[in-house]
Image: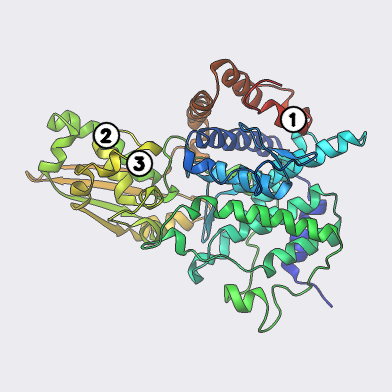
């Protein structure tokens, strides 16, 4: 039976595709460091930590995969879940925007967990462990698969969650890590498609909740399992996508799955970093604009709090995707609701001149000035912003915030490309370093934090470092 073309292309790319250009590898190292920074900061929040660890307390796993910043050494599935849950929890890890959205660094949970477990096992057998450089190359491939699938295949249009593309990417690279060839990789990919996809319900009113912070962890863990099953001889399914009536395209996507461009290093080289604000990415430029207006309001009115009295209307112009996903005036039930509200994040930035994860929690969440300011807001789609968003040459994420005062004066700021965008990569580097340094200092003693900052960003020997030694170095105390 002839196999689905898309599955064959993904398989060939994983097994034989050459990646490793200087720009892609530099960005991959930055992405790894940034994701680990998100993980360490998440360790300071009990809600993030409660799902981390073994299913059975006290379980001992020989050659288990370590979870950085914790004492846990777990089976690869639980480790993948734990790592990705921590990386993703604060909505602060890197992002990819297209017709579908997502966070490619979600896949790093599977890559780090399985890489550590297999490296420990290899060392015990007298074999060479994986190197960190090997994992960076796999990260480039995982990013590419998730991101290129996201370019034209919009799961959200049929009510499904983007983490399905995480599952597909994690399954493919996990099969490679296990040492699988074409048959095993094809099998793992086909099983990932056969799994179907989760609903987006937990990301939207009235059901927005913390599951959105561990949905990708569930996907990476499942990807590791499907790769394991493929290595045990589970056969692949030739037309898992295209089978009439029963295939993924007919039942789930309601359209053919397409690869919009050749597979290489495009996604890694163009990934978006959340540099300064833990908030849904479609609103990042609105936050930047609001922060600038905070300073203008202070200069013009004496204090930004005067906006509550003087503002007649606050107009936010956004892209179609932003309007559809994060146009939420409240009421808000939990932090997950607030960090996906364009109005909430803009109001906090206007009033306080900053936006951190703590602002989604109490006491800020109950600040009566926030709903009062939101009541003055109106969110509209700007068609030109939507075109710029989908234009492959621009990939902009524009937002304009316009404050009209009672006396007729207008405060206005447009930001097209956020910090962390490839067009602002050099400008973003000092901010990314500061973000990582802050996260490490929140979770670790000062000396350990500085050691890891050097290791992750500056040590020229990192790509050649054995993966098991690398995970040992990420422990709370120096090995």
Closest to the camera, between mark 3 and mark 2, is 3
Q: In percent of the image, x 48 and y 30: which residue is there? A: 427
Quadrant of image for the C terminus: top right
Q: CA distance from mark 3 to mark 2?
A: 14 Å
Front residue of 101 and 54: 54
- Expressed as whole percent of the image width and height from the top left, the position of residue 460 reads 71, 22
Q: Is residue 119 left or right of residue 253?
A: right
Q: Is residue 434 above or below residue 120?
A: above
* Quarter occupied by residue 7: bottom right
Classed neighbour count for the residue bearing mark 2: other residues with Cα under 10 Å, few (<14), some (14–19), many (≥20)? some
Q: Which residue is mark 3?
A: 361
Q: In percent of the image, x 76 and y 61: which residue is there? A: 188
Closest to the camera, between mark 2 and mark 1, is 2
Front residue of 333 and 108: 333
The answer, for residue 65, to whether it is visible in the render is yes
Label 3 or label 2, whichever comes before in sequence order? 2
Q: Which residue is mark 1?
A: 463
Q: CA distance from mark 2 to mark 1?
A: 41 Å
Q: CA distance from mark 3 to mark 1?
A: 38 Å
Q: How many marks?
A: 3
- Expressed as whole percent of the image width and height from the top left, the position of residue 451 reads 62, 19
What is the number of the mark on residue 352? Answer: 2
At numbered mark 3, what does the secondary structure look like: helix, strand or loop? loop
- Expressed as whole percent of the image width and height from the top left, the position of residue 67 reads 65, 37
Q: Is residue 100 left or right of residue 463?
A: left
Q: In percent of the image, x 30 and y 48: which residue is there? A: 344
Label 2 or label 1, whichever comes before in sequence order? 2
What is the number of the mark on residue 367? Answer: none
Label 3 or label 1, whichever comes before in sequence order? 3
At numbered mark 1, what does the secondary structure look like: helix, strand or loop? helix
């Amino acid at each position: 039976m002839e196999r689905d073309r898309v599955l064959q292309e993904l398989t060939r790319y994983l097994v034989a595709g050459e990646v490793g250009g200087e720009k892609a590898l530099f960005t991959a190292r930055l992405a790894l460091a940034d994701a680990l920074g998100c993980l360490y900061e998440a360790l300071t929040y009990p809600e993030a930590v409660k799902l981390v660890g073994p299913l059975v307390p006290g379980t001992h796993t020989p050659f288990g995969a370590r979870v950085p910043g914790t004492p846990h050494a777990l089976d690869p599935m639980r480790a993948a879940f734990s790592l990705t849950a921590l990386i993703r929890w604060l909505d602060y890890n890197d992002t990819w925007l297209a017709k579908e959205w997502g966070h490619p660094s979600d896949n790093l949970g599977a890559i780090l967990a399985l890489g550590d477990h297999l490296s420990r096992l290899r060392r015990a057998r007298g074999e060479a462990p994986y190197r960190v450089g090997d994992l960076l190359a796999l990260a480039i491939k995982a990013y590419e698969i998730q991101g290129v699938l996201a370019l034209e295949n919009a799961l959200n249009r049929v009510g499904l969650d983007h983490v399905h593309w995480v599952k597909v990417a994690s399954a493919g690279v996990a099969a490679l890590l296990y040492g699988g060839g074409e048959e095993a990789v094809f099998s793992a990919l086909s099983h990932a498609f056969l799994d179907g996809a989760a609903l987006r319900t937990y990301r939207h009113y009235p059901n927005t909740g913390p599951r959105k912070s561990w949905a990708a962890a569930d996907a990476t863990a499942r990807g590791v399992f499907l790769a394991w099953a493929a290595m045990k001889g589970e056969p692949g399914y030739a037309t898992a996508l295209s089978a009439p009536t029963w295939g993924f395209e007919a039942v789930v996507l309601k359209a053919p799955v397409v690869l919009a461009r050749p597979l290489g290093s495009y996604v890694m080289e163009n990934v978006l970093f959340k540099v300064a604000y833990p908030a849904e990415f479609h609103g990042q430029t609105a936050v930047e604009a609001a922060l600038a207006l905070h300073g203008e309001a202070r200069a013009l009115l004496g204090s930004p709090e005067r906006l509550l009295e003087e503002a007649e209307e606050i107009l936010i112009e956004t892209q179609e995707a932003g309007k559809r996903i994060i146009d939420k005036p409240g009421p808000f039930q939990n932090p997950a609701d607030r960090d996906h509200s364009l109005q909430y994040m803009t109001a906090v930035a206007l009033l306080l001149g900053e936006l951190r994860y703590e602002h989604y929690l109490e006491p800020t969440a109950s600040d009566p000035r926030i709903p009062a300011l939101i009541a003055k807001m109106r969110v509209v789609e700007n068609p030109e912003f939507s075109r710029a968003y989908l234009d492959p040459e621009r990939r902009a994420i524009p937002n304009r915030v316009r404050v009209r005062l009672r006396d007729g004066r207008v405060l206005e700021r447009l930001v097209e490309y956020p910090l962390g965008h490839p067009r602002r990569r050099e400008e973003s580097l000092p901010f990314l370093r500061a973000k990582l340094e802050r996260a490490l200092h929140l979770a670790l003693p000062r000396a350990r934090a500085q050691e890891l900052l050097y290791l992750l960003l500056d040590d020229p020997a990192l790509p050649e470092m054995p993966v098991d030694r690398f995970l040992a170095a990420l422990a709370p105390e120096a090995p």
